[in-house]
């Protein structure tokens, strides 16, 4: 049986319309965490390091 990623409760996947969550409540809690930026995807820096915005580079001449 799968576990809800929010509350860790076991649930029947056929019973819940919010798969992979056990309920709509857990689904909304997860969405809130993404929107509050508590969760995020890892980002790899571009080759050559951090790029400066063009406006900053122009001011430095």
Image (cartoon, rainbow, N blue to C red):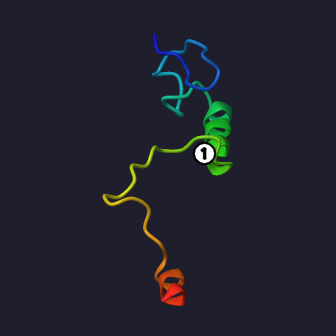
Q: Which residue is mark 1?
A: 34
Residue most extreme to the front: 61
- Report the front residue among 6 and 23: 6
Residue at the (60%, 45%) spot, across then down = 34
Q: Residue at x 68, y 48 (%)?
A: 36
Q: Please, which residue is most extreme toward the left here?
A: 47
Foreground of the two, 54 or 3:
54
- In this rendering, the answer to whether 44 lies above or below 24 is below
- Looking at the picture, how far across and down is residue 33, in whole percent? 65, 41
Q: Is residue 32 above or below residue 47?
A: above
Viewer-closest of 37 and 50: 50
Up the image or down, 4 lies above or below 47; here it is: above
The number of callouts visible is 1
Q: Is residue 36 above or below residue 25?
A: below
Q: Quadrant of residue 14?
A: top left
Q: Secondary structure at mark 1?
A: helix
Count residues near mark 1 (Cα–Cα under 10 Å), then give few for <14, some for 14-19, many for 20+. few
Residue drawn 65% across the image and 31% down it: 26
Where residue 24 sits in the image (x, y, percent)? 63, 35
Q: Position of residue 38 (x, y in %)?
A: 65, 41
Q: Residue at x 54, y 89 (%)?
A: 59
When asked about the image quadrant of residue 40, the answer is: top right
Q: Position of residue 54 (x, y in %)?
A: 46, 82
In the picture, which quadrant includes the N terminus? top left
């Amino acid at each position: 049986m799968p576990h809800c990623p929010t509350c860790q409760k076991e649930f029947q996947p056929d019973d819940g319309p919010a798969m992979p969550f056990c309920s709509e409540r857990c689904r909304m809690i997860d969405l809130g965490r993404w929107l509050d930026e508590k969760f995020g995807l890892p980002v790899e820096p571009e080759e050559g390091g951090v790029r400066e915005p063009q406006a900053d580079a122009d001011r430095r001449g």
